Amino acid sequence: MSRIAEALARLDAAIARIERAGAKSKSVPTDLEMAAELRRARADYAALKDKTDGVAKRLDAAIGRLGGVLGEPVE
């Protein structure tokens, strides 16, 4: 193989590696994509907040009942 052919083969291999690396990298999200993701995150947050509020109320009630069983005032 001539030196030029070898150089072209190496160049082709390097270009293929660069193209594969570019395909693997994530693209930058658009403003619309970011806004949609923010809406989803806010909806998830609201749902989780509702659940944690419900859990907190049930825990408070259980603590109150335990305090009543033990005859201790609960604050």
Image: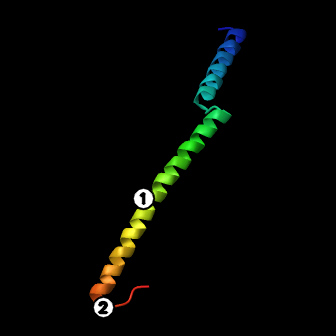
Residue lying farthest left? Answer: 69
Task: Judge whether residue 29 can be spotted in this image.
Answer: no
Neighbourhood count class around disc 1 (C-alpha, 10 Å): few under 14, some 14–19, many 20 upward: few
Q: Nearer the viewer, residue 16 or 39?
A: 39
Neighbourhood count class around disc 2 (C-alpha, 10 Å): few under 14, some 14–19, many 20 upward: few
According to the image, label 1 marks what residue?
51
Helix, strand or loop at disc 1? helix
**Quarter of the figure that contains the C terminus:** bottom left
> What residue lies at 39% left-to-right and 65% top-to-bottom?
55
> What residue lies at 51% left-to-right and 47% top-to-bottom?
43
Percent across and percent down for residue 60 are 39, 75
Task: Judge whether residue 52 can be spotted in this image.
Answer: yes
Q: Which mark is residue 29?
A: none
Residue type, label 2: Gly
43 to 17, vertically: above or below: below
Residue lying farthest right? Answer: 4
**Quarter of the figure that contains the N terminus:** top right
> What residue lies at 59% left-to-right and 25% top-to-bottom?
20
According to the image, label 2 marks what residue?
71
9 to 39, vertically: above or below: above
Helix, strand or loop at disc 2? loop
Residue type, label 1: Lys
Percent across and percent down for residue 38 are 59, 44
Please tell me in which quadrant of the rendered image residue 29 appears: top right
Please tell me in which quadrant of the rendered image residue 15 appears: top right
> What residue lies at 29% left-to-right and 89% top-to-bottom?
70
7 to 70, vertically: above or below: above
Q: Nearer the viewer, residue 20 or 59?
A: 59
Percent across and percent down for residue 44 are 49, 49
